[in-house]
Image (cartoon, grey):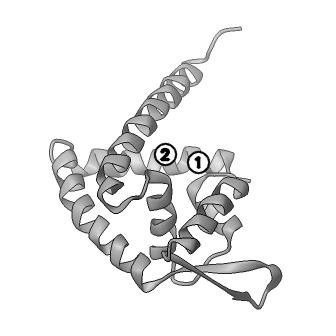
């Protein structure tokens, strides 16, 4: 069996996204190192910071595209480190709500101070239309894989 032209292009996109994911994880680890964090922990902070309400671990996992178990492990550690707090969930007895603590918010704000100039610098050679098209395409592809 042979790839269709779309199947071939899709495969190349997947491989490039895998490569980019590794590169961005390494960059994220470099940016977060001064705070004793990792890219994975930064993603959890970001998931919560960008949400209007506290989230459950399964909700965080969906936002991140990770397993619930992997997120639970990190959330538990981050709670012990004082970055996250648990509260009761009126909609579910066992699935606690997770929110940023004051310390978690402060660290996230400091990370944003580093990330914004980094993003501006690394996007300066790409026009806004190309970036918008790329984002829309990646969002469309993601829809095929979301449960």
Report the residue that reaches farthest toward the top: 1
Q: Residues within 10 Å of mark 2 (few under 14, many from 20)?
A: few
Disc 2, disc 1: CB below 8 Å? yes
Q: Is residue 124 left or right of residue 82?
A: left
Instruction: Give percent across and percent down for residue 110.
Output: 27, 70
Element assignment for label 2: helix
Q: Residue at image x 54%, y 28%? A: 10
Q: Residue at image x 66%, y 81%? A: 97
Q: Residue at image x 69%, y 52%? A: 67
Closest to the observer: 124 or 136? 124
Where does label 1 land, which residue? 142
Q: Is residue 128 left or right of residue 99?
A: left
Instruction: Give percent across and percent down for residue 103.
Output: 40, 80
Relative to 126, is 77 above or below?
below
Q: Quadrant of residue 5?
A: top right
Closest to the observer: 2 or 120? 120
Where does label 2 land, which residue? 138
Q: Residue at image x 58%, y 61%? A: 63
Q: Residues within 10 Å of mark 1 (few under 14, many from 20)?
A: few
Q: Is residue 101 left or right of residue 89?
A: left
Element assignment for label 1: helix
Instruction: Give percent across and percent down for residue 140.
Output: 55, 48
């Amino acid at each position: 069996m042979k790839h269709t032209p779309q199947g071939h292009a899709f495969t190349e996109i997947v491989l490039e996204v895998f490569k980019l994911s590794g590169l961005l994880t390494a960059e994220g680890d470099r940016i977060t190192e001064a705070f004793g964090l990792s890219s994975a922990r930064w993603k959890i902070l970001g998931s919560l910071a960008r949400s209007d309400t506290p989230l459950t671990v399964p909700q965080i996992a969906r936002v991140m595209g990770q397993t619930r178990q992997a997120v639970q492990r990190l959330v538990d550690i981050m709670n012990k480190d004082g970055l996250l707090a648990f509260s009761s969930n009126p909609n579910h007895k066992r699935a606690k709500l997770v929110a940023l603590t004051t310390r978690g918010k402060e660290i996230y704000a400091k990370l944003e101070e580093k990330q914004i100039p980094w993003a501006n610098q690394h996007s300066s050679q790409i026009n806004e239309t190309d970036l918008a098209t790329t984002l829309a395409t990646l969002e469309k592809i993601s829809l095929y894989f979301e449960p």
